[in-house]
Amino acid sequence: MALKKYVYFFGEGKREMKKLLGGKGANLSEMTNIGLPVPCGFTITTEVCNLFYDLGKRYPEGLEDQIEENLKKLEEKMGMGFGDEKNPLLVSVRSGAVFSMPGMMDTVLNLGLNDKTVAALIEKTKNERFGWDSYRRFVQMFGDVVMDVEHNKFEEALQSKKDKKNVKFDTELTAEDLRGLVEDYKKIIKEAKGRNFPQDPREQLKMSIGAVFGSWNNKRAISYRNIHDLPHNLGTAVNVQAMVFGNMGQDSGTGVAFTRNPATGEDKFYGEYLINAQGEDVVAGTRTPQHISKLEEEMPENYKQLMDIRKKLEEHYRDMQDVEFTIQEGKLYMLQTRTGKRTAAAALQIAVDMVDQGYIDKKTAVTRVEPQMLDQLLHKQLDKKAKKNAELLTKGLPASPGAALGKVVFDADTAVKEAKSENVILVRTETSPEDIQGMAVAQGILTARGGMTSHAAVVARGMGKCCVAGAEDIKVFEDKQYFEVNGSKVNKGDWVTLDGSTGEVFKGKIPVVDPEIGKNFKKFMSWVDDYKKIGVRANADTPNDAKVALNFGAEGIGLCRTEHMFFEADRIKAMRKMIVANSKEEREKALAKLLPIQKKDFMEIFKVMNDMPVTIRLLDPPLHEFLPHEDDDVREIAGELGLKFDELKATVNSLHEMNPMLGHRGCRLSITYPEILEMQVRAIFEATVELTKEGYKVKPEVMIPLVGDVKEVKVLKDQIIKIADGIMKKENLKFDYKVGTMIEVPRACVTADEIATEAEFFSFGTNDLTQMAYGFSRDDFGKFLPDYIEKGILEKDPFATLDRNGVGQLIKMGVEKGRKARENLKIGICGEHGGDPSSVEFCHMVGMDYVSCSPYRVLVARLAAAHAAIKEEEQKIY
């Protein structure tokens, strides 16, 4: 039986094999196939990574033979020998997952160097400094990445050498200095690990491949996948590639570029490079690089070649690409291309431009913008007037747009801790992949070193975080917890404001304002609406919420929570009087004061939502929520209500429930106190009549909450119809309305066919449905959710992303049974899941008519609905 193929030489694969070869490996093969100058190499598949873990961090049978076979092929292609003492082949070993995870996994460069091959490299290149620079880089990287020696030990040795020589940059060290560093580094490894740095290139290669596979599950990679909601079971590929060198002198260099601006989407080549450097120097931010446009002056032929490759890549991939390149002694090599990470504004701009330029169609453009990204477009911006009067500390590079203000912190752990109660700005000399968790919780990131393609910039853009990079006037003293800039000292806990669109850093707080939405956005969202099939409504309790929802394209209100209207100061007293009343008459008297207030609320919302449906949920929370609980508060409120302390305290105690979420609430309140329902329904229908007479088109939908039995619906629906009929008769005016129910009790899903005989619409309240299906209290669940995520019991918080296998099956049952009993049953969802893209997709799949979410999630839901429809259509085609 033939052994499985685990290793693919560049050119054997293609871009469609991303899942097997990882993004980097698939694209290296693709670039080879379209004739770009790619150094030869091979890819070890992602399957091997998963087997590596399954086998207790050992290689599967046959892998080493396949590696050796491809290594020989690489030697033949390059005309060099791996470990050869006269003409040594050196390689890089890099990770490459299906999804881009910049800087999160490990890389080893210059592999194959040892005490003998370094001499051959020097002899071959006639460049002693280059030889020792390459060797010291390799020993440091191998010690750090493969042998797990603390990175700082190498950095301290390097800094010590520079201090002794009184130089600032690595490039100022001589060949002899670098040779001394190699020996220093070897001693550091021996002292830390009790073993020598390995001299056998094949041992180096085997250990490095294992280290890259091992880095798939390092802390920062796991954090990155959690933050970006990526699966943990895909594994990484490993790419072994012949080395090319950007550190061979002034005719060599290395760079990172994007075929378009990843921050704004502008159709201009965007990138940075360093002369006489290796790739890690650019992305690590240890030296601040030159803008790519300067390369045209320094190396015009290479720049022209890069511009031609830029065009070829965009025509081939039909998307913005993120590329890495190296120039070795005047010859250009392409080391990577991948779909470039971008901000929401850039994604939108690129999508629209590429349609206009004929690269893609509108449907593809819609799929190019992820729904979650639209939140970034609503990020606040600095108030221009206030900004003019603010104290400017310095200006760096505008690495990721937006505004951010917060208290300064200097390390990731402190950021995570402080961000629980305060907005923080993470300030670093330069960020590293270890800072990922701190970057995730910070409002913004500020670095003293690094460019527009540094780790900080790339990761911040991917997260939609404001970032100012390469602010070189700043001197960061992380150990002393402050930074200095142009004579000012900023301590930990001081407030600063970042403008990621300009690179400006200000002292103190600057007010923020809502962003302006441009014409491209409106054009794009019109395409979105062409493809989505499911409607999008908003959860809105006030006229202002309703206006915001309309501006974001809501098609109605799917949940108006009436209880929120009672908490305002001018009405809470009447509500409390109703609750403490000892008779129906007293309750009705208190409710009579609330009726005109409630009616006015509904009128204002109906006006805003003219000719759109408005679903109003009858009173849902238990009555004790409207009363005080602390004795001092009870005493104060008792005085306001003209009651004795003991009387009000007795009422509070009588309303106490052991489990209020399952207690006297929802439809149960209206059954016990029908006068509450009467006041609310009368307010709805009187508002409808009055506005209809004024020429408005009102579409009220009365929603009965927390139903578990069809008889509950029937009792309350009969009461609602009686009130409506009475008002129509009295006013001599007919109006349309619907009566439906919230489906949030598991029994309601199971008996949905019965409930649908009375209810004209269903709205799934997935917050309560999730709570009751799992038996989790949503108020207490957060205490142990991290344990469930960490131990793999849950992949995601089920209150944030709908649980398709459990809660989802209850919903599916409810939809199918409901529609079987009432064919034209309108069905929606109004829990927080209505704005979650995965949950929206599920609602589309089960055939709901609409989702309803908070006003600020309407844009996300619209785009998620379009993605779901396009995905379904493509699955039907294939």
Image (spheres, rainbow, N blue to C red):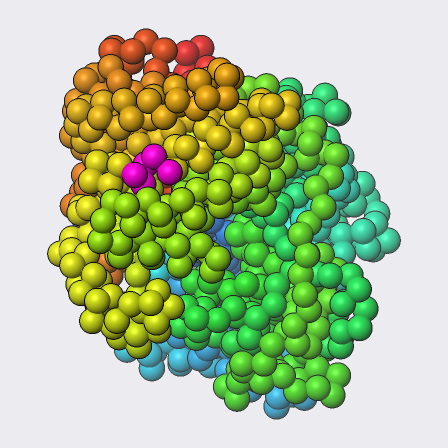
Q: Nearer the viewer, residue 329 or 392?
A: 392
Q: Is residue 835 visible?
A: no
Drawn side of residue 824 relative to residue 57, left or right: right
The residues colored magenta run 675-679
Asked where in the image residue 640 lies, by quadrant, the reply is bottom left
* Magenta segment includes 678: yes
Given residues 222 and 573, the one toward you in this image is: 573
Residue 446 on the magenta segment: no
Eyeballing the image, is 590 above or below 27?
below
Q: Is residue 537 left or right of residue 495?
A: left
Residue drawn at the location 76% of the way across and 56% of the way down: 291
Above or below 158: residue 594 = above
Q: Is residue 542 left or right of residue 205?
A: right
Residue closest to the far left:
658
Which of the two residues, 810 or 2, is positioned nearer the viewer here? 810
Relative to 97, is 161 above or below? below
